[in-house]
Image: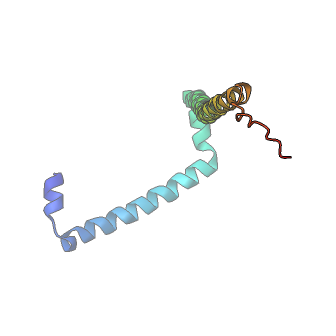
């Protein structure tokens, strides 16, 4: 049926689509009147669907809360990883600086060769 409908030209579909549009408008108008009258909620209470709807809403809210919590945890983990990476870079920089300072300290601690003393010549 789907393939046949797709093969039908736009001109051939037009009367059917107009009818569907009219029927849909009538349906939505009737449903909005029905819901506004309060008959829907009475029927749901009588059949027990109001409890089922409440349960679904509660489950939906719980899932939404869990999703928000998971998202917050993900953001927190991303921030911690970024902080950890920053600290690792700083640690490497500190290690390099410490090595450089130790090298300079060693240079300063080692005795420097003194220039040879020149014999004093006396001129008279």
Q: Is residue 26 something that shows in the picture?
A: yes
Identify the residue shown where x is 75% and y is 36%: 119
Camera-side residue of 10 and 62: 62
Camera-side residue of 5 and 92: 92
Q: Is residue 113 above or below residue 4?
A: above
Q: For this view, does 123 lie left or right of residue 23? A: right
Q: Is residue 56 above or below residue 40?
A: above
Q: How many tags in the picture?
A: 0
Q: Quadrant of residue 95?
A: top right
Q: Quadrant of residue 23?
A: bottom left
Q: Could you tell me residue 92's position as x and y percent?
A: 60, 31
Camera-side residue of 80 and 89: 89
Q: Could you tell me residue 55's position as x and y percent?
A: 59, 27
Q: For this view, does 117 lie left or right of residue 30? A: right
Q: Quadrant of residue 76?
A: top right
Q: For this view, does 25 lie left or right of residue 61? A: left
Q: Work out which residue is located at the far front of the displayed protein and give it.
A: 124
Camera-side residue of 102 and 70: 102
Q: Work out which residue is located at the far right of the displayed protein and give it.
A: 124
Identify the residue shown where x is 58% and y is 48%: 35
Q: Could you tell me residue 44's position as x and y percent?
A: 57, 34
Q: Could you tell me residue 17's position as x and y percent?
A: 30, 66
Q: Is residue 54 something that shows in the picture?
A: no
């Amino acid at each position: 049926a789907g393939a046949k409908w797709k093969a039908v030209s736009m001109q051939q579909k037009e009367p059917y689509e107009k009818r569907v549009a009219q029927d849909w408008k009538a349906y939505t108008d009737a449903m909005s009147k029905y819901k506004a009258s309060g008959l829907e909620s009475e029927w749901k209470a009588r059949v027990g669907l109001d409890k089922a709807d409440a349960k679904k809403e509660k489950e939906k809210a719980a899932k939404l809360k869990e999703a928000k919590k998971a998202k917050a945890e993900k953001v927190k983990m991303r921030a911690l990883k970024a902080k950890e990476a920053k600290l690792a870079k700083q640690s490497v920089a500190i290690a390099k600086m410490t090595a450089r300072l130790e090298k300079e300290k060693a240079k300063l601690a080692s005795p420097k060769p003194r220039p040879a003393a020149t014999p004093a010549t006396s001129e008279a």
